[in-house]
Every structure is written in C-alpha cells, then in structure tokens.
Image (cartoon, rainbow, N blue to C red):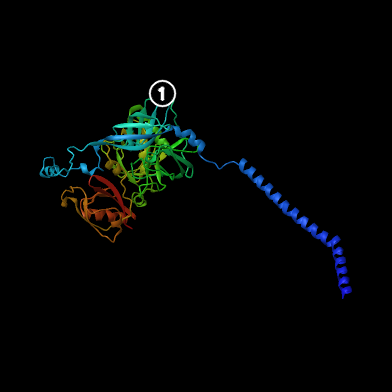
Amino acid sequence: MTDEVGSAAHELRSGWRGLLPLDVYRLAALALGAWIIVSGVGWISGDRALAAAVDAVNASSPTGFADIVERVKPAVVGIRVKVGASVNPGDSQQELPFPPGSPLDRFFRQFGVPVPDNPSPKSETSVASGFFISGDGYVVTNNHVVANGKSFEVTTDDGKTYQAKLVGADPQSDLALIKVNLPNDLPYVRFAANEPRIGDWVLVVGNPFGLGGTVTAGIVSARGRDIGESPYDDFIQIDAPVNKGNSGGPTFNVKGEVIGVNTAIYSPSGGSVGVAFDIPAETVKLVVQQLKEKGHVTRGWIGVQIQPVSSEIADAIGLREASGALVAIAESKGPAAKGGVESGDVITSLNGQEVKDPRELARRIAAMAPGTSVKLGVFHNGKDKSAVLGLGELPATSSAQDRADEKKTANEPSILGLTLVPASAVAGAGEEGVAVVEIDPSSRAAESGLQIGDIVVDVSRHPVKTPAEFRKVVEEARTQSKRAVLLRIKRRDTTSFVAIPIG
C-alpha cells in the first residue's frame, strides 16, 4: 500500500512539472494579455475623454443675442408718467357715503370713528418703455403712455433719472415723442431700412412691470395685422413675451435695428400669451419726423367713407375682381367728390398702383401730405375712369366713430327676405327710401348684416321710395341675368352697401 501511494505521488509531481512549461505559461500569458487589454481599454477611454474635454473647450458656443443686447440696451429707457392728482380708488375709507355735517357724520365723530374731512389726493403713476433715437435726447414711446400725463421721468440703463418734456403725440398711430435735456452724446438706436420677414428673430428690450432692462426673444409671427385700432392698422405680430410696461419700447432685429414699437398685446389673462403687436418702423419714422418738426401729424384726406368689395358686390356692379375700395359716401365738399367720385364707385388704383382694399387706400392716402395731387383709378357705372384731385387734410376732429365708419363693412352674402315700407311711414326715418321692418330669420338676408330699421335708399343706383319700386328694380335685374342687386343702406348717421343675390 505504501509503495502504491508513493508511486501515485511521484506521478502527480511528474504531471505538474509537465504542465508548468506549457499550460501554466500559457495561462500566465493569457492573464498578462487580459491585463494589457484591460489597461489598453482604460488608456484608450482616458485618451478619448481627454480629447472630448479639449473639444468642449475649443467648440464654439451656440449663437446667442448677448452681443446685440450689449449694443442696444443702453439706448432703451424706462418711463414713469404722473397723470395728475386724484383720490386713490383703493382707499375706500376716503369715499364718504354721507356729506360732512350730516347726522351720520356727527354720529361717527361722536363715537370716535375717524372720518377724513377731505380725501387726500394722490398722484397716479404708470410705467412704460421708450428709446433714444438721437444723441440729443429724443425718446420715442406710445401716445397711450403719455396721454393725460402731467410730468414725465426717464430712467436710463445705468439707473440715472431725468425729467422729460412732451414734444408731440399722435393718437391715430399711438406714437409720442418726448425729450430730455442732456449733452449730445447719448446712446441711441436706428430704425431698420428693410421690412422684417415672417420667421425672423426679434428681441424686445423694455421695462415690464417696472423691471427695467428686461430682454425677451422671439420671432416675427405675422405682418399686416388689423386689430381694429384705426383705419391705418398695419401691425407686426411677434411672439416675444411682452407685458405691461413694455408699451413704447423697441423691438430689434439681429442687426440691432428697430423694426417696430410695442403697442398692444392680446391677453385674455392680462399677461403675455405670445401675441404682441408692433407699429412698423416705416410708420414710426414718418410720424416721429412730423412730431419733431411740428409737434403734430398731418395726413392726406379725400373725404370718403369706404368699404371692401365682396364677390357679391363685384357681381352686382360688374366688376371683374372683388378688390378695391367701394365708396359708401363721398362728402359733398371733400376732394374726392370735387374730383367726380360718387357713392357706389370703386377706387381701384392710386397713382397707377393697384388698390387691393380700403385699408391699403387709407394708409397710402394718409402717408401723403395735404395738397399733394393724386390720380385715382375709378370704376364708375360699369366703366373705368380717372379722377385727379388735390388731397385735403384729415380733420383733427375725426372721432373714433368717424374712423369706424370709414372701415364699416357690409360684405356678408344676403338674399331677398325683407318686409319693407316707405320710409315716410316710419317716424323719424325721413322721406327717402324704404324701411326694413322685418327680416325672415330663415333667409340669408338675416345673415347679411341688414337690421330692422335700416333704410334702403337705392337699389343698383335706382332710388326707391316704395316697396313696389324696390321689387321693380329687382325684377329688371333678373331679366338682365344679373346675379345680385346692390342696396345702399342708411343706418343712423352712416351709409353702406349690401349686395343681395337674386339668381
């Protein structure tokens, strides 16, 4: 047994010695290789991390607006306007429900309840924005900012405050010009020479909620917006956040040029929802120039109330396209009437350039100086003609209602569904035309904009005084294969046209 154990041990020792030169070395080599591979991966990973770090240092940062803001921000100012002394509406205890010396007044005083003899007036102050347009201190802002203002205070980007005076204001465009008396070395900005495109980047710098020097960014969302402010609406819509206090501040392009002046926001909540409106730079330049020179703005005027041409109206009068400005009223002493333009005519061109709609005509006429001679292309009684006239000056007393009348439209489709009586039979309706006393609610006439009480003065330029005359003109139009008739309507102090399909 001892010999067998010894023999086995000898064989085991011999077998281990046999493995060492080949298999053990092989295992050692594999282990060394694994270490080299692992070390190599670590070295490669470390090298790549180092390279990535170097790239991050040398890589260019994303394009931003810091350089632009640094250039333009010093020209933007905050504005504080005091609008006079008044009782602070928030101090309800100052609103006495009983006169001094009355029984209730004596009662409260008897029991020591303090009753102010005279409510102390407090000045109401509003905050807004503006910007320097010259080195000698002229500042552009909104008319609604300075309206009823008693004093004006300008705070520059470096925190210094200066008193300013009002140079002039223009309610029609909602622009105003104020001035501070400072040395002729103030930072200022310039207006853009080119119109912005939809999608362009824009920057707004201003004083929202009194937080001066606030910058927001966005894009041009739309052009030519009409928000019902005036006949000259041509706003730029942007989506950069604009809030209370941004009024009167500038909107810049990426060149640092002013493309517009913030004037209004759409906000059901009272805060920014990304829909803001700017007065275009071209308009601002024209208005500011006149405010600087004269303190007020004069505009060309031809003395007409105009409305769009609907497809139904175009069919009714034989106009090839539904474009131009339909004359609802040509004032008897106005330049247009003196030049031969009549109610029912369509102004199709101005100085050889096409007029697309009433808003375009109003803006172009207003931009011209009174006294300027203009040539109108007019569609009159189925034929084209020209009218040459000298522009008058838009009356300064033109009210908001007057401006609304100029934009008055009645281009909804309608059909005959009317009950008519002679206007003379209706008290206060006058002797001219027929009065609408009933409109069939199931007819399209009910959707046309016609109202009970409207007076139809003429049908397709034929004066009518009775329902029979009205019917006769309509039947004649049908026999001539006309697709619509044109009604001239009087409603209170305004006149407009409605086209009614008859086919």
Q: Position of residue 40 (x, y in %)?
A: 73, 51
* Residue furthest to the left: 103
Q: Front-most of 104 and 315? A: 104
Question: Can residue 381 be seen here?
Answer: no
Question: Can residue 277 be seen here?
Answer: yes
Numbered circles on residues, count: 1
* Residue furthest to the top: 183
In the picture shown, does residue 33 fall above or below 193? below
Q: Quadrant of residue 230?
A: top left
In the picture shown, does residue 381 fall above or below 37? above
Location of the C terminus (image quadrant): bottom left
* Residue furthest to the bottom: 1
Location of the N terminus (image quadrant): bottom right
In the picture shown, does residue 357 fall above or below 412? above
Q: Position of residue 42 (x, y in %)?
A: 70, 51
Q: Quadrant of residue 117?
A: top left
Given the image, on which type of amino acid does mark 1 rest?
A: Pro
* Label 1 SS: loop
Q: Front-most of 412 and 375? A: 412
Look at mark 1 in the image and give the residue it sits on: 183
Q: Front-most of 460 and 9? A: 9
Q: Position of residue 429 (x, y in %)?
A: 18, 49
Q: Position of residue 46 (x, y in %)?
A: 68, 48
Q: Quadrant of residue 9?
A: bottom right
For disc 1, the neighbor class at 10 Å (few under 14, some 14 to 19, many from 20) is few
Q: Front-most of 398 and 119? A: 119
